[in-house]
Image (cartoon, rainbow, N blue to C red):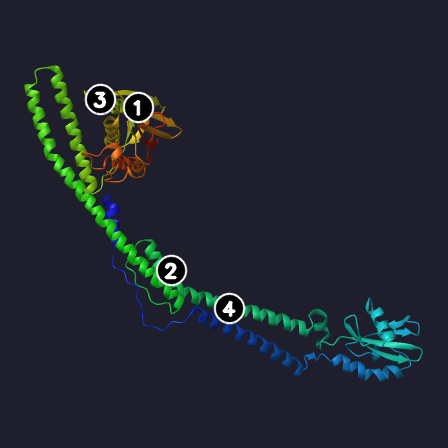
Amino acid sequence: MGRATKNRKRWIKTGVLKKENRRTVPFSLFYFKYFVFLFIGILVVAGLILLAFSFLIVNGYIYPAYYAQEQAREAKEAIADAAQVDEALIPELCSYVVFDDRGAVQAGNLKGRSIPDAWRAVKERTQKSGGSYYTVIAREGEYCVLQYKIVPQYRSPVLRRYLLNPQNLLLLCGLAGVLLVVILTAVLFGRTMKKKLEPLITVTEKIQKQELDVTVASSDIREIDAVLRAMEDMRGALKASLESQWRQEQEKKEQILALAHDLKTPLTLVLGNADLLRETADGGEQRECVDLIEKNARSMQRYVQVLMEISRDGYQLRMQNVALAPFLEEALMQLRELCSAKKPQKKIRIKTDFAYHAQQIFIDRELFLRALTNVFSNAAEYAAADGTVLFAVRQEGESLSFTVTDNGSGFSGEALKHAAEQFFTGDKSRGRDGHFGIGLYMVKLVAEQHGGQLLFENSKETGGARVCMKIFV
């Protein structure tokens, strides 16, 4: 508890989001700037591709697209007048085939599906068929057909053989260039966006950690700055909430300290008078009563001391291995004494239901016993006249539960929601005269400090309250 309070003190700091008088732009304009970068980059890539293409043509590294068609047109007269068609007459970028009048192939280097397309060009007198262009040259008793493509071509036969044609290669390079421009623009946009979001990320992380001493600069983007202003409002609300919570905890601590301090004096008087009674006691029964008074008064003194430690500096657990059977015997003795103290107003019977196999449990013995005593005290207080209190200890696997059930009026609906809250005294069904609302709250703390939990409900069998402390062994 002490450590948590110190943390809250550390959290409650004055934090101001730095608002600089800088010009901000909407996110759409910020995004449009990078769209312009992308557009200019694509234009630059396209320009470089055109320049490269022009350079290769001007310097004779590639033939222009119409070159093969011009060569076929220039060779047409020579082929028509030649005695015989051979490859020496055929232009460099052309393939050829010679048909007789009936379409039978006489000669040529044209192969595959291009031969029917070439004969179709003869019959239909077309220049294009099947994706290629054809020039038909009529000769005596035969036809010579030149096939070519109207695309740029390398001047070097080796490059024509192993590379894509210049047009496709430059197109591929252009696509690669556009992709590179897109990637570079995306990376630049991402880095700039990360920088713009850094103030928002910083303030979010600080508020998440409840470190409210925050100063951040403007992001220069209007929408992000609007979010930052909202975060500043949230920071202020959180700061006010933590301050209020811290003040409430301080008030509760002061109340507990005052209560514990006020208890010390009457307990000292009880112990002093118990000593006087022992001297004047004339019977065994009177001495037993005096011993019981002294025993419980000293137990209350230790309880008060623990309350003061918890409220002031935080209680340090004194964990140890405790034999379970003797511990339960001592707890049962406390329950008997509490029930006996209700006589003659009530005659309370005690029932037990033990089913466990663990030999030892690792607990703070005194603190855990005190928590059980709190539960016993409530059960004895609210059990009906001539009623019953059931103390059950059951083990299921690694879970060990300590359950106390009475047959009183049970918890109200409000108490089922708030009974374990500190200073809750609003449960009229259970009575609140003389109670300060710290009993079940302390039991809950002890259960949680031992890695367990506190459960409470109304028993379906008795209609009374059922309180269970569950821990792991």
Q: Circle 4 sits on which residue?
A: 184
Q: Circle 2 sits on which residue?
A: 201
Q: Are marks 2 and 4 in contact (CB under 8 Å)?
A: no
Q: Circle 1 sits on which residue?
A: 390
In front: mark 3 or mark 2? 3
Q: Let me know if residue 129 appears in the view.
A: yes
Q: Do the residues labelled 4 and 3 touch (CB within 8 Å)?
A: no
* Left or right: residue 28 compared with residue 324: right
Task: Give me the C-alpha separation between circle 1 and circle 2.
Answer: 56 Å
Give, as a three-letter code, the residue at label 2: Ile
* Percent coordinates x, y for residue 387 in the rendering: 27, 22
Task: Give me the C-alpha separation between circle 4 and circle 1.
Answer: 75 Å
Task: Give me the C-alpha separation between circle 1 and circle 3.
Answer: 16 Å
Packing grade of label 2 (10 A; few <14, some 14-19, many >=20) is few
For label 2, the SS is helix
Task: Say above or below: 129 vs 247.
Answer: below
Give, as a three-letter code, the residue at label 4: Leu
Q: Circle 3 sits on which residue?
A: 346
Residue 444's label in the rendered image is none
Task: Say above or below: 31 vs 446.
Answer: below
Place residue 470 in its image quadrant: top left
Q: Are marks 4 and 1 in contact (CB under 8 Å)?
A: no
Residue at 19%, 22% in the rendered image = 345
* Percent coordinates x, y for residue 466 in the rendering: 32, 29
